[in-house]
Amino acid sequence: MEPLKTNRRGFIKATGQLLIGFNLFPLTFCGTKEGDGYAISPYQGIPERPHVDRSLIDSWIRLDAEGHVTILTGKQELGQGIRTALMQIAAEELDVNMDICHIINGDTGQTANEGYTAGSNSVEGSGKAIREAAAEAREFLVKKAASDWGTKVNEINVQNGIIYGPNDQKTSYWELVDGNFYEAKVSGKAKEKEPKDHQIVGKAIPREDIKNLVKGVAHFVHDLRLPGMVHARVLHPPSYSSQIIKTDLSSVNEMPGVLKVIQNGNFLAVIATREYQAVKAWQKLREVTDWEAKNINILPEQLFDDMIKSSEKAELIEDSPGITQQIRQSLQKLKSTYMRPYHMHGSTGPSCALAKWENNQLTVWSPTQGVYPLQVTLADLFDLETENIRCIGMPGSGCYGHNGADDVSAEAALVAKAYPKAPVRLQWMREDEHMWEPYGSAMRIELEAGIDQEGLVTAWDTQIWSDTHSTRPRGDAGHYISARHLEEPFEFKKGNFSGGAYRNATPLYNISSKRLRLYNYDGPLRTSALRGLGAYGNIFALESFMDEMANLAAVDPLEFRKNNLDDPRAIAVLDRLAKESNYHNRIQQSNTGYGLAFAKYKNSAAYFAVLAEVEINQENKSFHLQKLTGVIDAGQCINPDGLINQTEGGMIQSASWTLLEEVKYDEKGVLSKDWITYPILRSKETPEVIVHIINRPEEKPLGAGEAAQGPVAAAIANAVFDGTGTRVRDLPIKAEKIDW
Amino acid sequence: MAIKLKVNGVSLTIEADPEEPLLYILREEFGFNGAKFGCGLQQCGTCMVLADGEALATCVQPCQNFEGMEIITIEGLSEGDKSHPLQETFYSEQAAQCGYCVNGMLIAALALLRKNPKPNDEEIRLSLDKVICRCGTHSRFISAVKKAADQNSRF
Ligand code: FES
Ligand code: FES
């Protein structure tokens, strides 16, 4: 595609656009995404203007007279391929080719407020809005052509934006919008295409941005270079409660290239001309600063007992009177306790953000998962009105939850405020990310259940102990770690306990009596949302326990699950898995273990079943995860390769959590500071992964990005049990936990 | 101090602190984006370049250690409009999620294929093992390298 040269600032004079319903005040104080020296996209794009109302078509879709379609979404690209998927949806409804489509992700200066990109709901949420807006835009334009020609709408045909009438008439979207401003709303009534007519949705359209990634074209927030930009590093304390006893800013100040050393309470930062000078200054600052801290008193070996000791009274999420009695009287009964440790997001690239203060206006370029929540929380931090803050979302290193992205954005803004002359680029060091990101909470899960003579589970009792799974900033600056370190610190009010902790804890199985009790635990480490939240631990427990019960009932684990299931789509993924993996005729050798698991994510999103195969080496007392075969039903599949890619990634990531990972700490603080002290799965040990899709074009698309996390953990545990006879109930599953 | 570096066939003399790791020079002086900061500890491979045929981390080694070496970054892989076979197969296999590790994976694979154009599965895995990928894209990187090796003999 040839780049089009449009002058984005001269847009009022320029040719028309479809459906303009906005106020014309440009955000003059803000830089643009494609600011000087930063050519991410050759297409200069539509003119910027603020989002006003999500019911307007042009809040989601804009067509310009030059033949481009721009889609706006409040969701962020996290590597999950959402940009391509959303463009497919728009292109499909509009009848245009993909190569004229562009997309703008979260930017408080332009896009709708869609909260956080989380919980695998982008296609369900943003996708729906874009689909409706696109259908409406197409209808609007087709009606316009029809009335110009005096023909009927259903006699009109559109191909790649060219509109054909019944009597050889021809025009195009671009001609219709040329020189005109139209305004229209999304009524929700425009007819959307039937799934059977889909040409683009359901196709494995490749992600074009990969072409740029392999050439090293600027892509990440890390690659953004603004004119006059300076580099910053923040010196984080050695542990959560550390206070500065003494430091020596002047010794750092006189280092080459250092522009400023900032101290605000326990918040320390350096600014330098070159990045390496900032790194050196940061090292020096670390050497000359002494801290004191309170010891952490709940150490890893006490953690899971302390959960019971220190938690408050249980929240009763679900109840079934008489359940204890019922389990006691069951023909067969079982009780098990499962544990997961703290896990890290561990993004490959440490978090990075840029910020600029100018005339009391703040602009932040951020890899956050939510630009609007960032904006309101920065407003709290700086006591500014939100209209004085613009947050522009940029791709970061894969985060899968609440990592350091929001913290680094707030810190960049803090540093920029102290140095208002220039845009500031702040990147965290490896130890900042490892030690300061909020982890996925450790959890303790106790399950108890009873089975009747038919092998059906009749009662299921769950108890969960967990710290919060969401401390994402949503307006309170105390959620930024550095805000707590300032001279006038912001208070952190934890809250938000229960939500994510019992995600997927209720079995989807057909069980008449169920109870679910949740104990909110205030643990020693900082926690927040990690891919799947509590679902990872809960499904690990639940699906391990199903296996234990199948074993107790002496029924094949696949049959046992199917016997206890009603949901036909759940049964379908299991059947398909059995077929694809040749489960019924699997070769049963003494050195191989097979393990199955299944879940419907959140009990409302994608269905996923997986078979793990482990190879057992008795002699070396070791095992190796050879292969994972998965089947996913995410309803209508927008992009099969995107769905497979994301699911494969989830499977490998979960295998890594399950086999290797736990955050280590002692009384002085976090010990997992780098990739040696927090190893993750690498290529040599990566299992073969295969994903099959059950596509259901007639069903609504279901969130899929987190579907694999829990089932993979349980499948591995079940395979290890099958191969060795040892049931490992505390993650990670390491060879030394197996009774050889 | 004046440091002479040859990157992607172009020689440049720059004024730099000789202790400054090559990574920062590549990003700030040369304006490259491929090599990225991941750990600064030679543990993750995101900052690698091909230096005299070896995949080397650039985040710790001072730039002066690279003087006289033939340095190649992923920006230097395509010839005109023609992408390098590895760039082609990384794209055709859609081998990326967030993409932060792609540079390291490409460079690791390139070093392997230049020495051993027909590697087996083990050798591919081993060569990519030095690169951290948090998104779990490993299986796609492995198949992209395999595909490049199957379809080409010169890298
Ligand atoms: S950044 Fe150089 S190896 Fe990690
Ligand atoms: S694709 Fe994200 S780190 Fe590898």
Image (cartoon, rainbow, N blue to C red):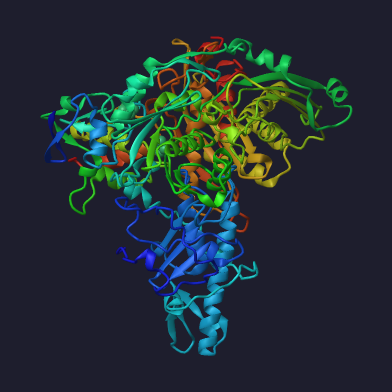
Name the side, left or right, on which A131 lies relative to A396. Answer: right
Q: Which one is in front, A247 or B122? A: A247
Quadrant of the snapshot with the N terminus of chain A: bottom left
Q: Which one is in front, A21 or A519? A: A21
Q: Is residue A245 above or below residue A555?
A: above
- Residue A575: quadrant of the picture: top right
Residue A635 coordinates in the image, percent (x, y): 60, 51
Q: Is residue A146 above or below residue A680?
A: below
- Residue ID at (71%, 38%): A508
Name the side, left or right, on which A457 lies relative to A7. Answer: right
Name the side, left or right, on which A610 lies relative to A497. Answer: left
Q: Which one is in front, A69 or B114? A: A69
Residue A611 coordinates in the image, percent (x, y): 55, 32
Q: Is residue A306 above or below residue A634?
A: above
Residue A454 coordinates in the image, percent (x, y): 79, 30
Residue B117 coordinates in the image, percent (x, y): 21, 35
Q: Which one is in front, B1 or A598? A: B1
- Residue ID at (53%, 28%): A486
Is there any visible trace of residue B128 in the rendered image?
no
Name the side, left or right, on which A145 lies relative to A422. Answer: right
Callout count: 0
Is there any visible trace of residue A523 in the rendered image?
yes
> Ligand 1 sits in which quadrant?
top left
